[in-house]
Structures are given as C-alpha cells and as structure tokens.
Amino acid sequence: MERLDLGEIQDAFSTPLEQFVRDSGVRLAVLINRSGQILAQHGFDRFYDLIGVAALAAGINASSRALASQLGEDQFEHLHHAGQVRQLFLGHFDSAAGQLMLVTVFDDSSSIGLVRVFFEDFVRRIRQLPEMDVARSSVSAREFEAELESSLDRLFQDLIGG
Amino acid sequence: MRTGAYEELLNQVMRFPGVRGALVVAIRDGLVVDGRVHVGVHGEAVAALAASLYRRACRATGAKRGQGRTLELDAAEGRILIAGKDDLALMAVLERRANAGQARLAVRRAAQKLAKTGRK
C-alpha cells in the first residue's frame, strides 16, 4: 500500500488503538507498517521519540525476520523485552493494508499476559474496520528497504545531531 | 493445554464437580505456567485478567511479595478462586453449581505447594 492510500484510512486506526490502551493498561502504543510509517499512536509527547521508536521497531522486526528465516521459521510470533520497570511488546499481523506492527511499552500496571490477550482483540478490530475493505497492498520489497533506510537515517541524524 | 510438573496439584483441584479449569500462573506476567481447562474456557485470558486483579488487590491491601493471599471473584455464571504463593498463583474456574467450600480448600492447599513443586 502506498503512503497516500494509507493516509486515507489511518484515522480509522485510532479508535481500536485507544481501546487497546484502555483495556490493557499500557503506557505507550504505536501502530506502524513494515516501513516504520506511523499510523496511530498513544502516549508519546515528543514527536522525535515517536519517530525513533517507530524506526527502531521496524528495524527490530526486519532483523527478527532475518533471524527467524535462518532458523527455518517464517517469522517469530511476538517479541517481548522485559526491563526492571518497563517492558516492550512488539506484535505484528497481516491485514488488507499489508503487515502492520503494534509496538507498546508498559509497566507494573499491565503485564505481558494482558497485552497478549488484548492484542488479539486489537487485531480483530483492525481487520474488521470498514476502511480495510478498500485497502490495497502494494508495498514492494524495494519500497520497504528504501523507507526503512530513510527512517533509520533520520533517527541517527537526530541522535548524533547531524 | 499440556500439563507437566504441576499435574498433581492441578488434579487436586480439577477432581471436584463443576471445576472448569485449574491454572498455575506467573503473577507478574499473567502467563500460564501449566494448566488444565475444559473446552470453552479461555485459559490465557483468565490467567492474564485474574493475575492483574490479584496484583492490584495485593497492592491495595499492602500484601508483601511472597505472602500467600487469596482472592475470590463471584459472578452470575460462576466464580474464580485465586491463591498465591511467592511468584505463582493457582487459579480455579468454577461453575455456579460447584462446591465452593471444597474447591477453596483445595486451591489453598495446592497453592501452598506451588513453590516447592516448581523447584523439583
């Protein structure tokens, strides 16, 4: 799906995302596509934090796909990193708008179990959106690679002040 | 759902009529460590939601980590019993007709053996 097409339907993603945040009790959540394009978000105050998380998550997803491939898997189901205070969950799913990814950060007020349970609901709600009926998937491997590189370049430029 | 090290404890709870499921759950994560559930019981959802309530109840009552505590959710169609020990909790999903007294006792007894069983 081209950026222009996604832009037309991305407003529809906000309601399911807000519902997911309410149900699961997570702090931060962002829905992105494989290129790292942001489709909906909750909880991010600073724009550059959001761009960074989206770009890095797209990179993590690409790396984990490559690792899964080496191990003979199509793709790992979810990715979960647990810290002392905060935890990160990265879940991907296929939709009419191509592969989408939910990246979410949570603390003691939620749990990985809750996030997984409500992630399933979230995916179901996204797939049932009327806007998804008109979605077309046309992201080519080249576009994905180019967009990912561009997002990572932007992130590193911000980080090193370039 | 596959059972393993906790099979004996789960059986102690499941043997009562009207018990639809028994789960050993990691309290912090809300994930199922081991369990047996009847068809129609969404074990993962029960584990995640009940563990969340249990954590909040412990926080609200000032229970310290590792102290055994029990929580009971009474609903129109049945009830959920939860008894915790250290980082784990034993949960039972009961139909309305189940003998709650017997099940409660079994859940508490089984929960006391949780940590010991996990270290075997």
Image (cartoon, rainbow, N blue to C red):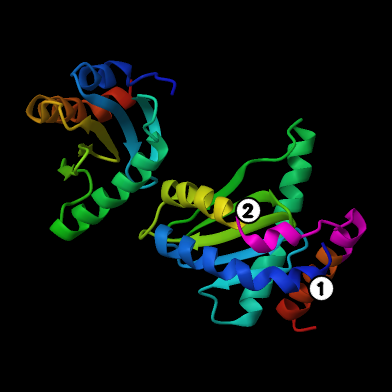
At a point 49% along the width and 47% down the height, the residue shown is A116
Residue ID for mark 1: A4
Q: Which residue is mark 2?
A: A127
Measuring from the top left, give residue B43's x and y in whole percent.
38, 34
Q: What type of secondary structure mainly makes up the magenta span? A: helix
- Could you say which quadrant of the image residue B44 lies in? top left
Q: Is residue A110 left or right of residue A152?
A: left
* Protein chain holding label 2: A
> Which part of the image, by quadrant, shows the C terminus of chain B?
top left
Mark 1 crowd level (few <14, some 14–19, many ≥20, 10 Å Cα): few
Nearer the observer, A7 or B111 = A7
Mark 2 crowd level (few <14, some 14–19, many ≥20, 10 Å Cα): some
At 76% from the left and 60% from the top, the residue drawn is A135
In the rendered structure, which segment of residues is drawn in magenta? A127-146
**Mark 1 and mark 2: span between their CA atoms?**
20 Å
Q: Residue at left 39%, top 25%?
A: B39
The residue located at (45%, 62%) in the rendering is A26
Is A154 contained in the magenta span?
no
Q: Residue furthest left?
A: B101
- Side of A135 relative to B69 (left or right): right
- Nearest to the observer: residue A150 or residue B97: B97
Q: How many marks?
A: 2
Report in which chain the residue with disc 1 lies.
Answer: A
Query: Circle 2 sits in a helix, a strand or a loop, which is it?
Result: helix
Is A131 inside the magenta-drawn segment? yes
